[in-house]
């Protein structure tokens, strides 16, 4: 045996070494070692811990879709076998344990370590990022619930004469649950309904939507109501006149010169059988005592039951009562300014007449003696002295105080001169018609 082993020992050792070397060469050529990338979904562990502590995951969708990419080094045949048919999903596991959370405010991020594990048959693979810790970013908030009224918004119109009356929503309230920061952003919950759908179907089922103050929809919150039923009646609209109800007294020598209502007309809506019987609506009483200046009042519009204002939510209007003072003023009118038509010679016995006028102070102050035109009629009178009433053409809002003023006049036939002083005779000559 020793003799057999001893023969050509050197060659035998050399052959063995050569065989081993060739084996390694073949292995490295046919099945070399290399690095390959794998995308692994992150498994979320102990999700129930979050709910049990009355917390909510703000970035839930993000963490549930979390994937990581890892690099593994090993032989080509092993890596190819692992990647075929995504077998690596059963061999390599990435997991994040949510029990490790610390923070419960949306302003703070929980860094949950992601653990990578391999099945026993692939322990020979080398995870190249084994010294690198990967994290799952977890954002938590305290869970909060709020109950809000569901409002209905009608879109579109039926016709120019009819309108959808106040819609009814069933259920009328909704409970919303979610993170505190989102809950605090809620401004309104509403359902949008097309007016024609109400007209055709009477009742429409719509999903309630949540909106913030800027009108943006908030979709990340959960709702206990998936759909709400909206129903409404069709009403008729009509433009009507507002009528003031004034109950008051004015100060002595003061009077109202006008009443202005703003707006003087409004648009109302209600059931057709009610609206057809309404052409005007009275305002609430305007009560005052000893009123002496222009004043603005704000009475309420009194609408019948089942009728509402359509063009505005305002229930009051502005009523301006204009008040002005009345005065009496005397005017001295020279008789020479009077108008008289006659073929006779004449002379005025009176040199002037006194006229007392009563009316609104502003109107009275606009009158001057020169603007007052008076006339007398002596066409049916004969020779001699006569007292004749003077007719004045006065503005419609000015009244004469007392009886019409009288003037004494003397009519003279032919060339005869009337009685009186030389001054009176001279005046008569000037006044011959």
Image: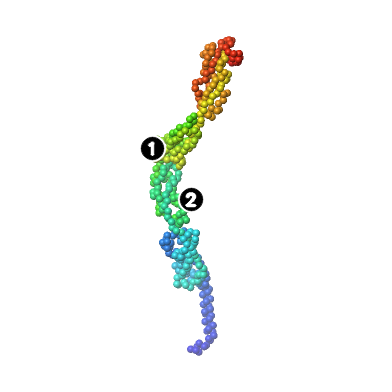
Question: Residue under circle 2?
Answer: 213
Q: Which residue is drawn at 59% across and 10% down?
A: 415
Which label's residue is closer to the chain start, 2 or 1?
2
Circle count: 2
Q: Which residue lies furthest to the bottom in this view?
A: 3
Relative image position of residue 270 (x, y in whole percent): 41, 40
Vertical comparison of 53 with 372: above or below: below
Say what secondary structure mark 2 lies in: loop
Position of residue 121 measured from the top left corner of the image (x, y, whole percent): 45, 72
| Residue 50 in sight | yes
State the residue in front, 314 or 364.
364
Q: Where does residue 171 sit, x and y in percent of width and height? A: 39, 50
| Placement of 259 over or under 121, stated as above or below | above
For residue 60, which numbered disc appears in the image?
none
Residue ID at (49%, 71%)? 125
Residue 34 x/y as whole percent: 52, 70
* Furthest-front residue in this view: 421
> Mark 2 touching mark 1, by CB under 8 A?
no
Q: In 3D space, how far apart are the residues under numbered discs 2 and 1 (Cα atoms)?
A: 40 Å
Please say if 100 is above or below 225.
below
Residue at left offset 48%, top offset 63%: 110
How crowded pointer 2 is (Cα within 10 Å; few <14, some 14-19, many 20+) is rated as few
Q: Tell me, yes or no, if residue 162 can be seen here.
A: no
Quadrant where the C terminus sits is top right
Give neighbour class at mark 1: few <14, some 14-19, many 20+ (Cα, 10 Å). few
* Viewer-nearest residue: 326 or 88: 326
- In the rendered image, the vertical position of residue 106 relative to residue 316, given as above or below: below
- The local secondary structure at tag 1 comes to helix
Query: Which of the labelled discs sits on residue 273, or is there none?
Result: 1
């Amino acid at each position: 045996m020793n003799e057999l082993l001893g023969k050509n020992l050197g060659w035998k050792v050399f052959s063995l070494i050569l065989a081993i070397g060739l084996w390694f060469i073949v292995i490295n050529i046919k099945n070399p070692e290399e690095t390959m990338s794998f995308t692994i979904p992150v498994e979320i562990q102990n999700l129930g811990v979050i709910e049990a502590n009355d917390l909510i995951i703000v970035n839930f969708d993000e963490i549930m879709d979390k994937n990581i990419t890892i690099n593994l080094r090993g032989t080509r045949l092993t890596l190819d076998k692992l990647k075929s048919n995504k077998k690596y999903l059963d061999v390599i596991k990435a997991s994040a344990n949510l029990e490790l959370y610390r923070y419960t405010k949306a302003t703070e991020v929980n860094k949950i370590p992601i653990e990578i594990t391999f099945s026993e048959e692939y322990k020979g693979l080398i995870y190249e990022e084994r010294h690198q810790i990967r994290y799952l970013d977890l954002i938590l908030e305290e869970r909060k619930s709020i109950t809000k009224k569901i409002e209905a918004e009608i879109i579109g119109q039926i016709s120019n004469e009819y309108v959808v009356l106040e819609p009814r929503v069933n259920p009328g309230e909704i409970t919303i649950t979610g993170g505190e920061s989102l809950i605090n952003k809620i401004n309104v919950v509403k359902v949008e309904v097309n007016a024609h759908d109400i007209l055709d179907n009477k009742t429409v089922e719509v999903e309630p939507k949540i909106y913030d103050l800027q009108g943006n929809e908030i979709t990340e919150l959960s709702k206990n109501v998936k759909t709400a039923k909206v129903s409404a009646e069709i009403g008729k609209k009509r433009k009507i006149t507002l009528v003031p109800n004034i109950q008051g007294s004015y100060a002595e020598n003061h009077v109202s010169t006008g009443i202005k209502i703003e707006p003087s007309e409004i648009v109302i809506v209600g059931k057709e059988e009610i609206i057809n019987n309404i052409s005007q609506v009275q305002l609430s009483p305007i009560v005052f005592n000893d009123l002496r200046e222009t004043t603005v009042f704000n009475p309420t519009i009194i609408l019948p039951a089942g009728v509402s204002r359509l063009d505005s939510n305002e229930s009051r209007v502005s009523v301006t009562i204009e008040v002005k003072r009345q005065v009496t003023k005397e005017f001295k009118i020279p008789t020479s300014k009077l108008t008289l038509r006659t073929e006779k010679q004449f002379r005025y016995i009176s040199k002037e007449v006194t006229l007392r006028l009563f009316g609104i102070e502003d109107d009275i102050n606009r009158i001057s003696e020169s603007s007052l035109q008076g006339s007398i009629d002596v066409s049916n009178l004969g020779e001699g002295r006569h007292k004749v009433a003077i007719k004045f053409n006065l503005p419609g809002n000015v009244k004469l105080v007392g009886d019409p003023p009288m003037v004494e006049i003397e009519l003279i036939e032919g060339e005869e001169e009337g009685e009186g002083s030389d001054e009176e005779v001279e005046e008569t000559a000037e006044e011959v018609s």
